[in-house]
Each structure stands twice: as C-alpha cells, then as structure tokens.
Image (spheres, helix red, strand yellow):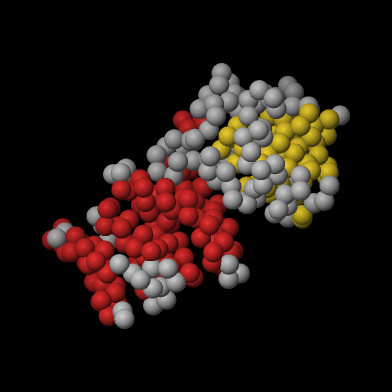
Amino acid sequence: MRFRLRYLQHDLELQDGEFAIGRSASCQLSLDDPLVSRRHAVFTVAAGSVRVEDLGSRNGVLVNGQRIEGKVKVQPGDKVLIGSQELTLIEIAEEDPQRGMLRTTAARHPITLNRVPAVDLVTDEYNVTKVSYSPVDMANELSSVRRLDGFRVLGSVAEKALAMGRADEAERVLASSLAEVLDASRKGKVVPAPLAEQATRFAAKLASATGRGTWIDYAIEIYTTLQRPAPAVVIDELYGAFRKANAVDVGKVKAYVESLRGQLPSFGPADRFLFQRIEGLERLATLRP
C-alpha cells in the first residue's frame, strides 16, 4: 500500500521515511502559517504504516480533534491539524495510480507554501516550489474559487481569537493577508467582490475589537479604489466599528462618499440605498469628537 496526505484538494505522496512539516524551508512541506512552528511535525512511513509526531510545537498536533503526545499511528481517513491546516491521510492501492497527483520525495522536492494556504489572494498564481510530474506548477490546477480559501482558513482562526477576546492575536493572523489585498487594489489589480467583502468585514471587526481606526480606513480605501458601494454586511460591521474605534481618517470617508456621489446617475435602487447608508457613515465620522 501507498499513502498520501490530502491537502488543498491535492495528494502528496508519502514515501518510506520521514516527511516533515513546518515553517522552515528545510521541511518537505513548508507553510507560512503563524500557528505553525519552524519544525512542527513529522510523518514517518515504515512497515506499511504511518505515524505522526509533534516536534515540540507551540500549538501542538491534533489527530481527529485530539491533541497528541509523542509518536502516534494514524489510519487512512484520519484528519491531522497542524496549525490551522488540515491534512487527511489517504491509502492508495499500488495498482490504482492517480493521474495528476503531486509527487514528492522527502529529500529532493520540498514543497513551499508561502501563505495559508500558499495562494496569491488576488491573482490565480500559487507561490509554490514546482514539484512533481516534471515538475508542474500548482497554480494552473485550481479554479479561481481557491483564491479565497486561504482567507477563509485564516478567518476562522481569527474569529475564534476574537471570540476569546484575543484581538491582538486575531490581528496578527490576518494582517499579512489583509495587506496583500490592499496592495493589490492600490496596484489596480482585479479584486474579486467576495474577497473584498471578506477582507473589509474582517478589517471592520478588527477595528471594533482593537479600537484602531486604521482598520476602518482600510475598508474605506478598498471600496474607494474599487469605485463601488460596500455591501450591506460590510456597512453593518462599519457602523459598529465607528462607535468603538478611534482616529478614523474623516477625509478618506468624505472622499469615498464624493466618489460614489458622482456615480449616482448609474446606480440602481439597491446601490442607491447602500449609498444612503454610507452617507450615514460619513455623518458618524464627522460627528466624532
């Protein structure tokens, strides 16, 4: 029997020996995840079985939701959580090869994922070391929907941190991805509407939790650059954030409202209603002490 780790809809083949996972580039699977240690865990394949070991990581290794100690045998179908990344062990019969699989050896073809997951959140590019068949680039194999997955993974971690009152931790988890979206919008790249919505909603949540008005400025700048009204769910979050955050850039809010006012003749009823609510945000910003 052969074993694979299923991660991000791809199968990574485990050969006899060790397969290390962590943030270090020396690992066979390198993840730039703030919850992953430099050398976080190692899978060992020997005698037709697979074991996983926590290498003294800060956040531990969970197998089917249970934190492990030492080296633990894992069975096909078991789910292993490393940082915020979930991997599933798959068993494949020798006579049933799967085309399109990512093949890697522990020594020669390490995989580097430069974000969580390793996806440029705006383009369709994946920042990965080319591995396997010849090698190939993972970028062309996944649909554009996968661009959001990294943010969704981080977002779930951040939501838990916010629920526990750990606003600074949530901010650290999201900061890099939020900065990437803003940088892309400033450079004129196409930012998909669902991604813009997720990024600005989390920015507003961070503004409410940390009291930092710069996160409100972030959301306003994103939609000013995109030249469209923010969706209702973002506006709702911003109303709450305006009441809790300090030092909001009123000039940015006014500039955003003016840019939308110039587009009013082309707005339908729904966008006009959103515009009225955004005008309400401008009044809140102006009335702040």
- Locate residue 50, reporting x and y percent: 80, 36
Rendered view: 217 above or below 154: below
Q: Inspect this view and state whether residue 101 appears.
A: no
Q: Is residue 127 left or right of residue 110?
A: left
Picture quadrant of residue 120 = top left
Name, please, the residue furthest toward the right: 47
Q: What residue sits 27% from the left and 80% below the top?
A: 287
Q: Is residue 176 left or right of residue 1?
A: left
Q: Is residue 27 left or right of residue 203?
A: right
Q: What residue sits 42% from the left and 37% below the top?
A: 124
Rendered view: 56 above or below 49: below
In the image shown, does 60 or 52 lie closer to the viewer?
Answer: 60
Split into 4 quadrants, where in the image is the N terminus?
top right
- Locate residue 85, reporting x and y percent: 62, 47
Rendered view: 35 above or below 208: above
Q: What residue sits 76% from the left and 32% below the top?
A: 18
In the image shown, does 281 or 102 lie closer to the viewer?
Answer: 281
Rendered view: 40 above or below 201: above
Q: What residue sits 73% from the left and 21% below the top?
A: 95
Q: Inspect this view and state whether residue 150 appears.
A: yes
Split into 4 quadrants, where in the image is the C terminus?
bottom left
Picture quadrant of residue 19 = top right
Count of number-bearing discs: 0
- Locate residue 111, reporting x and y percent: 60, 32
- Locate residue 21, reporting x and y percent: 68, 39
